[in-house]
Amino acid sequence: MAEKHKVLFVDDEIIVGRTFVRMASKLGYQAEWVSSGVEAIDQVRKQYYPIILTDLNMPGLDGLALLECLRGLSPTSVTMLVSGDPALELPDPKGNDCSLAGVLHKPICFQTLERALAQASEMVKLRLENDGAILKKILLVDADQLDSQLTKARLQRDMPCSEITHVTTIEEAQRHCCDDDFELVITELALPDARGVEAVTRLHHLFPNAAIVVLSSSGNESVALQALKTGAQDYLLKDRVDGPNFKRAVRYAVERKTSEKNLLRLAYYDHLTGLANRQLFQDRLVQALARVNRTKGELSVVFMDLDRFKAVNDSLGHEVGDKLLQVIANRLLACVRQTDTVARLGGDEFAILFEGAPEHEVSRLGYRLIEAVCQPMELAGERVCVGTSLGAAAYPKHGFTADGLLRAADSAMYKSKQAGRGRLSWAGEETNVHALRRLRLESELRQALSKGQFELLYQPQVRPATGGIESVEVFLRWRNNEGQLISPGGFLPMLNEMGLMPEVGAWVVHKACHQAAQWRNKDWRVAVNLGSQQITTDFVDVVDQAIRESGLSPDRLELELTELDILKNSEQVASVLDRFTERGVGLVLDDFGTGYSSLSYLKRFPVNAVKLDGKFLAENDGSKVTRAVIDLVHALDLKVVAEGVETQEQFDKLSRQGCDRLQGFFLARPMDCDSLGQWRCRQAHNGNSLAS
């Protein structure tokens, strides 16, 4: 049965109007009557009517003229003409732009009206379904009573939905944050408890899964850009939205938010099983390690591998193999606690993170997992059985870092396989030796800064056309107690996990700024890499202090950060990056081509340049893909830096493709400051000639 919608009837005859309302009400419709086209337009501006019937011949604004107005005011409404002329027929559907569903002839009998309204209701339902205009829940945040009423009327008219919740403050909105199924949040920026983009920031935090549309009275372009960078999907002016424009903007905002969530899901979840992927598991493990390090809590990692999976895959096919993995994933989830993380690391390998569970409890859960996996299942008409072998490692007994614990659990899993499969083994003594080695390394790193063991090396980025240095990237090295110079891969992960990166990062920025200020060539910039722990408001103060004490011009400092660091906390990142930009510090998006490589980040965040990853360049050597990426970045008025240039051929190709800066071993390896000066003198002596 079709839904009984609200109906508006327009006729200048009082008796006809009252008769229509009486009959329509008996049929279950909410019917209202107005006596002129002008009154009808006023009503439609106030609220949404899915069905509108109008008399053809009326004084002033007649029926056809009214339909023309309704086309813009209420485009989703289904309309019908009412006429006393029995010869009047429905116009040609191809030329019908007014949503005209039919013609009713006077006098209207009860049965005729019933059929007509039922037909119109079906058309309303189909139109909304095809147009995707139905939103289940919308939150409206606006303290202005009149504006909020007008917005609600627009929503009911242009984007019909089951429920609109109206609040006047962020505090009121917070009461609904547990009910996080709002698809759309529409907000004004001038609220009693939040002004400007602060409103967007707080709402984005409360409702991370909802699209946010700012509907404001302010036409300040700077504020609009800030709102979009902070998390809003669109920024609309109240006095410029009406008719289809509002509906279209809202629909696009919801679609953009949906696309953003889908991208995040692709980045952090396994597409086959829906479990966390390796990246998300690593992130959660690192965070959990930081928590238990503070609270002295318990944490274990279980690594598992399916037994006989390859035989099933080879004999029954990959489609059955995929289905088996999905069944196993569901069984694993059913065995663990809600606070535990289950991940598919790849192939038939899984990992589980247990936080706050003692070893004996992890062992109990482990054997429960083995029992669940071993249960037979019906796949493709066949009875299929697989098994599993588990390895477990506990913090800090078997490892101090995420990588260390995973390696220990992986080794223990192979012990289970060698011992006969279908069992759980804990990491053993050889893991303890490794853990002790890591403990000593941690102790040495804690003293490295005070002992002055950190050093900086410098690698130039050159302009291909002239061979002149545009910028110099700094690289951190550690000279340990044995006098060995350790590359970042040997100590940076541990610095991050120990929480020492902000302190060491501050030293790097200070050292780099002071060194750059002493260079004879005052056009060279210095580029410093940032980690996720450094993208904070406190680090903005560190940069301010380094610039002030060194006397370096802010525009000679560049900060490089990766897409992954942006994704981890895009709301906070946007705010911090804006503060750097205000100071004139340059920003470079590093490792472009290894993550999403999404152009939306380039528009959303105030970066000045994009650095193409060396691996991306190697995989697309000389291809049209590289040229297209360079052209797109240039179209956004950004510079392109290519790293990992190792051959003359690469140098020539990237030069022809329009890269603004090149960097790599072909030009120069990272070197100390004195060697950098000597390298530059040699280049100047050779006339800066780099190309063949």
Image (cartoon, rainbow, N blue to C red):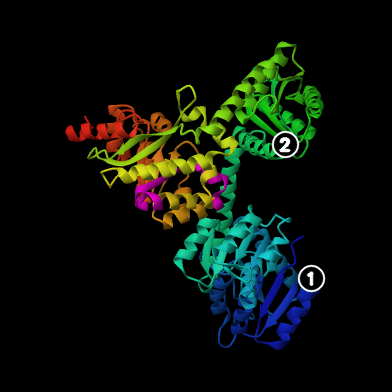
* Quarter where residue 282 is shown: top right
Q: Inspect the image, locate mark 2, and give the three-letter code of the amino acid beneath it.
A: Lys
- Viewer-closest of 550 and 380: 550
Secondary structure at numbered mark 1 = loop
- Viewer-closest of 677 and 43: 677
Span highlighted in magenta in the image? 548-572
Please indicate whether residue 439 sits to the left or right of residue 505 in the image.
right
Please indicate, yes or no, whether residue 317 appears anywhere in the rendered image.
no
Give the residue pinned by disc 2: 296
Q: Is residue 90 above or below residue 514?
A: below
Please indicate whether residue 171 sits to the left or right of residue 223 in the image.
right
Q: Residue furthest front?
A: 451
Please indicate, yes or no, whether residue 130 appears anywhere in the rendered image.
yes
Residue 258, image x, y percentages: 59, 50
Give the residue pinned by disc 1: 28
Between disc 1 and disc 2, the foreground one is 2
Q: Residue at x 51, y 27 (%)?
A: 490
Q: Residue at x 55, y 56 (%)?
A: 231
